[in-house]
Image (cartoon, rainbow, N blue to C red):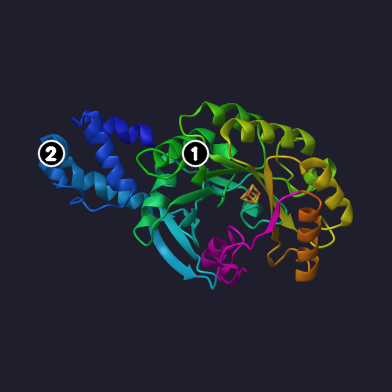
Amino acid sequence: MRIADLRHRLRSLGAKPKHEERVLRLWVNALPQTHGRRRIEDWLPLELREALPALEAELAALAQLRSAHDGEDGSQRLLVTLADGQTVESVLLPRDGLCVSTQAGCAVGCVFCMTGRDGLIRQLTSAEIVAQVALARQRRAVRKVVFMGMGEPAHNLDEVLEAIDLLGTAGGVGHKQLVFSTVGDERVFERLPQGRVKPALALSLHTTKAALRAQLLPRAPRFEPADLVEAGERYARSTGYPIQYQWTLIEGVNDGDDEIEGIVALLKGRYAIMNMIPFNAVDGLSFRRPTDDRAAQIMRTLNHRGVLARLRQSAGQDVDAGCGQLRARELAPGRR
Ligand code: SF4
């Protein structure tokens, strides 16, 4: 189900725009039907009122909790079953954030990511993306939604943008608190500025060297890092939100002094924040995490040289934190 289909169904059941918005708001915000002055049944057209229980059951089936796993950092990883039995992961983040999946599997194939190992399984619909927020809100408040779970949002752009539109309107999430994360794609830079809800943008950079980037992100569009930064800068200036650059820090791969020089050359003076996330061990991959000392030294150097940089940890590291790890383990318990 797409959000557009849902709106169409509501209208065909006699909903006027105010009814449609109210039903959507109750769903996305996981509010009880008694929210507000009157019960919802009191003011809906009869046909819609009668159809509502079945529709609500259908919406609830879009994303159901299979298991929840608490992390020591206050995060909680949710394994979510979709209506056709596929599973994806969402992560409740500290400070009312939620990381959602936009695809089951992913075609980009980043060599350090468990999700990328199996390729794309299927796209999620806009309603399935929003349903992860509705499900999470049954457990906790959600005031920020980052599209950094399983999948590459740019490869499912229409659905993700439709979800963003609803979350930024009836969903009550501030536009800057919606974070579209991508490896970089021309269509993203064309479409995002056109939306009535303009999300913040996170760009997965991972290295300043084009050849190495092609190895690490084998099926990402071939953007020169400098061109990616130029496109990001234009979006940042037009929206007024800084670009968040993402960098999975891997020992001996992209943690050298040459990369620090490259980052300074690319990002000094830019409206940007560099988020570095030390690699999280994945069985079957030979990559290693840099020492804490080395990661801290990189942060100090970047900040000293005029690049705003933060060291982040992948949420819930103690519970299979790399995206796709929890799903892989639950579906094949011998595999870690
Ligand atoms: Fe896809 Fe993101 Fe994993 Fe890369 S890191 S394979 S873009 S899910």
Left or right: 312 with respect to 250? Answer: left
Please identify the quadrant where the C terminus is shown.
bottom right
Q: Nearer the viewer, residue 332 or 201?
A: 201
Taking the spot 63% from the left edge, 36% from the top edge, the residue there is 236
Residues marked 1 and 2 touching at CB (< 8 Å): no
Check disc 2: other Cα within 10 Å, few if <14, some if 14-19, many if 20+: few
Give coordinates of residue 125: x percent, y percent.
44, 40
Image point (17%, 37%), residue name: 48
Q: Secondary structure at mark 2?
A: loop
- Visible residue check, residue 214: yes
Q: Quadrant location of residue 154?
A: top right
Q: Residue at x 11, y 36 (%)?
A: 46
Would residue 268 be counted in the magenta stretch?
no
As drawn, 2 above or below 40: above
Please count the marks in the image: 2
Q: Nearer the viewer, residue 14 or 286?
A: 14
Is residue 287 shown to the viewer in this render? no
State the image coordinates of residue 275 (x, y, percent, origin top left): 68, 53
Rendered view: 192 above or below 152: above
Query: From the viewer's perspective, is 291 left or right of 100?
Result: right
Which residue corresponds to mark 2?
43
Q: Amino acid at mark 2?
A: Trp
* Mark positioned earlier in the residue sequence (1 or 2): 2
Disc 1 marks a residue whose amino acid type is Val
Q: Which residue is mark 1?
A: 160
Q: Secondary structure at mark 1?
A: helix
Residue 296 placement, left or right of 314: right
Q: Nearer the viewer, residue 276 or 57?
A: 276
> Which image quarter: residue 180?
top right
The picture places residue 27, in percent across and down from the top left corner, at 30, 47
Q: CA distance from mark 1 to mark 2?
A: 31 Å
- The residue range painted magenta reads 307-336
